[in-house]
Amino acid sequence: MTLVATGSSAAFDGGAVPPLKLEARVVPEKVKVGQPFELELVVTHVPSQRYELATPGELGDFEYLGQERSRVDGADSSTTTVKVSLMAFSLGKLPTPPLTFEVTDEAEVTHVPAPRADVWVVSSLPADAQTSGADLYDVRPPEQVPVRTWRLVYGLLGALALVALGVLLFRWLARRRHTTPPPPPPEPLHVRTTRALDELAERDLLGQSRFKEFYFRLSEILRGYLGERFGFEALERTTPELLEALQERPTPGLDFENVSTFAHQSDFARYAKAEPTVTECQAHLELAYRLVRDTTRAATPSAEPNGSAHGAH
């Protein structure tokens, strides 16, 4: 069963923008007592918001096992999916336990209840055991069981064969470790990032007036670089969260003012349906090359970034 609810401003504290749509479904819809099942919560919301499911406390007839979260961004809206693993310990048709979303929009945090769905919980006993009234456990006195001696011999032979196989496998793996060359080291961060910028330039999105797609890809490349260079998760952060994370840590070689200006102008081009000029887009691409070069030089003064003809920008 899938339950759908449209957003309502009454569900939010602080007057924040409500979700566009809330959906909940249980997979599978019918489970046995103590059998794990999944509550899938799907939220459609404005791109500036970030939805996270708060870890619940005591849930009564349910036990919380964990959750997985994913997000897909579109042109005008984003979709966040949270899959919650649960177990039930009562029989019958039960509504899933009350859960709460924490919603972050810029610097404001609000709360909204997650939608609920119904799950059918049935007994784990066989049908005949539930209706016959027979004893479920039968205690019997010990009985002597004859064991043929050749079974013991076969068991010992099987154990010896397993030991021999283990020895052979160990020797084969040892030889393989000595003969297999180690994998090549991963390419440096600035080489991978510069290649991604080169590929973006070669796609000629600007010549096709696909400015929004250009800024989505350029922002993704630059955020991924900054997160890996300075050691934090950058792709899932809002623009204020990204800038705050950069200010909280050492960022040698980084022109923070230019990064801040680019981040806000990129958001404006992606979400406000503004159409920048080709000259502005090319300037931001050159800025990305320059940020990669300057921060790489600051991190490794003796190393000159290479890997693209744009290294001179």
Image (cartoon, rainbow, N blue to C red):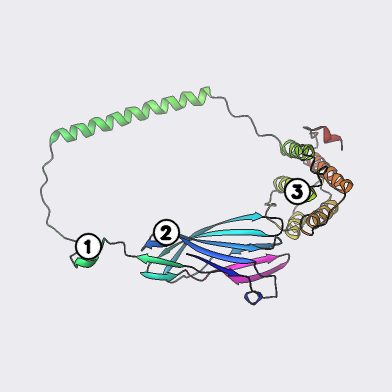
- Quadrant hosting residue 265: bottom right
**Vertical order, 121 against 265 (above or below):** below
Q: Is 145 placed left or right of 15 in the picture?
A: left
Instruction: Name the quarter where the C terminus is drawn.
Output: top right
- Give the magenta range: 96-117
Kind of residue at disc 2: Pro
Q: Position of residue 119 (x, y in %)?
A: 43, 66
Q: Is 121 placed left or right of 213 in the picture?
A: left
Q: Is 170 placed left or right of 195 in the picture?
A: left
Please name the residue that numbered disc 1 is placed on: 128
Please name the residue that numbered disc 2 is placed on: 36
> Helix, strand, or loop for circle 2?
loop
Task: Say which label, 1 or 3, has the lower sequence index.
Answer: 1
Please name the residue that numbered disc 3 is placed on: 213
Q: Residues within 10 Å of mark 3 (few under 14, many from 20)?
A: some
**Vertical order, 38 against 180 (above or below):** below
- Quadrant hosting residue 77: bottom right
Residue closest to the far front: 208
> Helix, strand, or loop for circle 3?
helix
Tell me the distance, in whole angstroms, between the alpha carbons under discs 1 and 2.
24 Å
Q: Where is residue 27 in the image (x, y as percent from the top left)?
A: 46, 59
